[in-house]
Amino acid sequence: MADYRQFLDDFTKNQIDLCLENSTIDPELFQSYGVKRGLRDKNGAGVLAGLTNISLIQSKREVDGKMVPCDGRLLYRGYDINDLVRGFLSSPSKHFGFEEIAYLLLFGALPDKGQLADFHDALTKSNFLPTNFVRDVIMKAPGKDIMNSITKSVLTLASYDDQAADNSLSNVLRQCMMLISVFPMLAVYGYHAYNHYECGDSFYIHRPDENLSTAENLLRMLRPDMKYSELEARVLDLALVLHMEHGGGNNSTFTTRVTTSAGSDTYSVIAAALSSLKGPKHGGANIKVVEMMADMKAHVKDYHDPEEISHYLTKLLHKEVFDQKGLIYGMGHAVYSISDPRAQIFKEFVKKLAVEKHRDEDFALYSTVESMAPKIIAGERAIYKGVSANVDFYSGFVYSMLDIPTELFTPIFAIARIVGWSAHRMEELINVDKIIRPAYQSLLPLEKKDYIPLDAR
């Protein structure tokens, strides 16, 4: 096997020059053909590819006939995210937000007490895995990439569903609710398997408690003693709500709609969305923030010295430190400019958690970077819109304070975003019966090449 792998490595290294020679396209051709790279124009606006009633993202408003940047707004089914968060946090019932907001996104209306109780009961009844699934699927071939583990599990679950390919609305809704319910188990159990078999730690499986919320069960299943504080659960619940949905244009949700449009089954659609989310440009961004801040702490001696912090941030942009990518991670967003409303909401609770966890110094450093980075970026680069902290800037810090391993950062994003994916899958099935097929301009000449016999080459 080792010799075979070495042969393949040598072969691919020798052939890569051919790939580069025959697949590299002159960047200027994208401009000359009017191609919007990444389906975005030169100002960053996305190509209009569909309609949705699920959420609204606003980063500009009209003033005197011109569109100007404004504080970011995020609406779920017409409700401002700020109002929704204030609503469930100040509710006399003290209920958690994930289940209520999931109901809103899936069905388009806020539930009353009876509807919310029924929905929670339906999720609880869906909260089980097939007999021996953990042993035969999750524990087999464990690895550090928990997103791959979840994707493998989702695709395997199709084998246990005798209606896997049935795309009727009621069946798709059933499948989506089941996946929403079991995602925390798939993620946490996948991590425990990796942590045991690859890292040599103890292995334990805790069943979720039917009386607890999704956030509470996540912490319960993850921790050996199953204990957590009220604030910890509330902050994690808030993180799930803020990551639950963000329009049809983000990469993983668009993948959901593209794959749905092909007539694929729910398991394949969600597996495709998971694969799209896992990259560092999408769901893995918060990991880069945590790594960047760790590198900063290793190089900045005085966290209270603005000049020293500014010097490090400038070196980041000059590709002189950390990963030499020239980026200050957690700063900027494809849509928002002045502010990301999710980051604004999150920050207040991050501060409370930092006090409880005795991480005040770290929070102060994050706050300093948040205030300084946009000015430094604006001074170093020509930017077409404002730059501000996005939700990923703080989410990784929160997860680290909750003692959540980095391997689960992106899976937690998926645990939240599957609600949005499910809503968009349903909306695509209800409204559109046409496969999504964008056009690509071929650069090949119309004149065909002559085939040369093998012996004559």
Image (cartoon, helix red, strand yellow):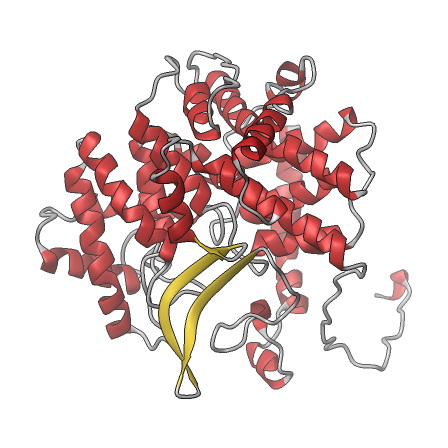
Q: Looking at the image, can residue 411 be seen? A: no
> Where, quadrant-wise, is the N terminus in this rendering?
top right
Figure quadrant of residue 135: top right
Figure quadrant of residue 454: bottom right
The reply, left or right, for residue 77 in relation to residue 72 is: right
Count of labels in the image:
0
The reply, left or right, for residue 257 in relation to residue 320 is: right
Image location of residue 281, percent across then percent down:
48, 54
- Residue closest to the eye, 320 or 164: 164
Residue shown at 36% from the left, 43% from the top: 395
- Give the vertical position of 449 relative to 86 (above or below): below
Image location of residue 303, percent across then percent down:
12, 48
- Residue closest to the eye, 243 or 122: 122
Figure quadrant of residue 377: bottom left
Residue shown at 76% from the left, 60% from the top: 432
- Give the vertical position of 385 relative to 318 (above or below): below
Image location of residue 312, percent across then percent down:
20, 57
Q: Looking at the image, can residue 315 be seen? A: yes
> Where, quadrant-wise, is the C terminus in this rendering?
bottom right
- Residue closest to the eye, 112 or 337: 112
The reply, left or right, for residue 424 in relation to residue 114 is: right
Image location of residue 290, percent across then percent down:
32, 43
Residue at the far bottom in the pictured view: 64
